[in-house]
Image (spheres, rainbow, N blue to C red):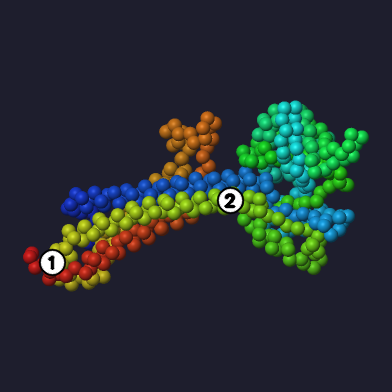
């Protein structure tokens, strides 16, 4: 097979066993360094992607991506025609589901404990695709409709309150009060626990769900009491784009008067958490990329020693008519062979570890979650793998430029004078 002379010689040099032991040692460890760096970067980035995906699933799966609220500041008696608005919002781009709800801060009390929570009044018929419905461990969210004055709570909250299905809890609204013969007291009502869910996030011990009809009665509201709609999008990070579109009223729209509703997005409450995760992910990228960079630039020292060792051969090649550019190509080829070996084997090793990380940890006996066995979330994204491999190859290429240039500046008359 025909090969350019410079590539042919570069490949011969990379396979040559005549180099000194120290040069071979540095070359070997530069390749191994790139291999380990690429494998580590692929594995860690896959784990970070998995954690980010779990956060999006467990937190953004239940927290509304966009909340549309009825603004009663200008006209407190204005009706909120949410069914028509819901149908209109369902036609918007990126919107998957729109569910009505009401909410209020409250205290939940059992025979043994008292805790602050956020009470949400929902309509179970609209919540069939909610993550709560798919993570019920006891009871059902439909019980809110069939059982009067019932609640669905998280497993962590149930454990704190020491209650189970059928037990009674008391909901107290400290910001709502009524007059009684004993004076003004907070609005309160006894509810029965009709369901328990477990998502594995902070929502488990802070959210309480009731049917909107009984929530409206608790809040002393007429009708169903609905004053908010929550939008679930195809991607939570499209929330700002959706809000910008909704804030532009169109002719004939139910929401033509933009002052009647207000919009808020998930990042107002959870944005700091995801910003911290993103910053941590970027820092891991940076640190592990520096490891790959250090390993790649070990190629510099190895190639510099090869250039010194091959001075006489370089001089002979130049006297035979080999151009300076061809000399540069020889040593770029030799350096890139080492880089390609490291990147290729590191990429394969990283993909293998990422796809089998939990099995490997089980075999080794490592449990990062303490006593409870839980799989480490891993999500391998091929775009990240391609980015890591290409970046490592670019670093390897840059590392070969200086030694290759130094080789091309060799003066044949000087190096061959004593030959």
Within-10-Å neighbours for mark 1: few <14, some 14–19, many 20+ = some
Q: Position of residue 257 (x, y in %)?
A: 81, 64
- The picture quadrant where one finds residue 337 is bottom left
Is residue 113 visible to us here?
A: yes
Q: Residue at 62% of width from left, 38% of height from top?
A: 200
Q: Residues within 10 Å of mark 2 (few under 14, many from 20)?
A: some
Q: Nearer the viewer, mark 2 or mark 1?
A: 2
In the image, 174: left or right of 161?
Answer: right
Image vertical order of residue 213 relative to residue 370, above or below: below
Residue 274, labelled with which disc?
A: 2
Image quadrant containing the C terminus: bottom left
Q: Nearer the viewer, residue 317 or 391?
A: 391
Q: Quadrant of the N terminus?
A: bottom left
Q: CA–CA distance between discs 2 and 1?
A: 61 Å
From where the camera sits, is residue 381 visible? no
SS class of the residue under badge 2?
A: helix
Q: Which residue is mark 1?
A: 415
Which element is circle 1 on? helix
Seen at 67% across and 30% down, the residue is: 159
User: Could you tell which of marks 2 and 1 lies nearer the N-terminus?
Assistant: 2
The residue depicted at 72 percent of the width and 38 percent of the height is 116
Q: Position of residue 172 (x, y in %)?
A: 79, 37
Image height check: is 185 above or below 254?
above
Residue 378 lies, in percent from the top left, at 51, 44
Of the pair 355 and 141, the residue shown nearer to us:
141
Farthest-out residue, left: 418
Q: Is residue 164 above or below residue 383?
A: above
Labels 2 & 1 near each other (Cβ < 8 A): no
Looking at the image, residue 273 sits to the left or right of residue 294; the answer is right
Residue 320, percent from left and from top: 15, 70
């Amino acid at each position: 097979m025909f090969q350019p002379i410079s590539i042919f010689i570069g490949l011969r040099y990379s396979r040559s066993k005549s180099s000194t032991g120290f040069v071979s040692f540095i070359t070997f460890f530069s390749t191994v360094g790139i291999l380990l760096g690429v494998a580590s970067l692929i594995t860690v980035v896959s784990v970070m992607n998995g954690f980010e995906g779990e956060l999006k699933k467990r937190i953004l799966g239940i927290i509304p991506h966009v909340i549309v609220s009825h603004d009663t500041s200008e006209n407190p008696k204005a009706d909120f025609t949410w069914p028509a608005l819901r149908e209109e919002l369902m036609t918007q781009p990126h919107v998957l589901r729109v569910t009505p709800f009401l909410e209020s801060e409250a205290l939940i009390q059992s025979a043994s404990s008292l805790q602050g929570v956020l009470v949400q009044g929902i309509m179970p018929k609209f919540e069939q695709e909610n993550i709560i419905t798919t993570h019920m461990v006891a009871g059902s969210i439909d019980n809110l409709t069939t059982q009067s004055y019932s609640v669905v709570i998280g497993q962590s909250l149930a454990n704190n309150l020491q209650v189970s299905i059928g037990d009674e809890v008391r909901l107290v609204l400290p910001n709502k009060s009524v007059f009684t013969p004993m004076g003004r007291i907070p609005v309160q009502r006894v509810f029965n626990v009709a369901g328990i869910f477990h998502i594995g996030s902070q929502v488990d011990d802070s959210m309480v769900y009731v049917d909107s009809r009984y929530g409206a009665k608790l809040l002393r509201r007429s009708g169903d009491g609905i004053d908010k709609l929550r939008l679930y999008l195809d991607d939570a990070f499209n929330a700002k784009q959706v809000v910008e579109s909704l804030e532009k009223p169109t002719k004939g729209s139910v929401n033509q008067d933009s002052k009647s509703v207000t919009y808020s997005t998930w990042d107002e409450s959870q944005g700091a958490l995801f910003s911290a995760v993103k910053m941590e992910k970027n820092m891991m990228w940076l640190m592990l990329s520096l490891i790959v960079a250090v390993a790649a630039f070990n190629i510099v020292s190895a190639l510099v020693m090869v250039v010194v060792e091959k001075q006489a051969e370089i001089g002979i090649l130049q006297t035979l008519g080999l151009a300076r550019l061809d000399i540069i190509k020889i040593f770029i080829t030799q350096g890139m062979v080492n880089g390609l070996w490291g990147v290729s084997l590191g990429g394969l090793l990283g993909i293998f570890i990422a796809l089998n990380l939990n099995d490997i940890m089980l075999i080794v006996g490592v449990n990062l979650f303490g006593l409870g066995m839980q799989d480490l979330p891993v999500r391998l994204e091929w775009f990240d793998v391609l980015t890591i491999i290409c970046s490592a190859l670019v670093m390897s290429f840059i590392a070969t430029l200086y030694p290759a240039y130094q080789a091309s500046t060799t003066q044949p008359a000087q190096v061959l004078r004593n030959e």
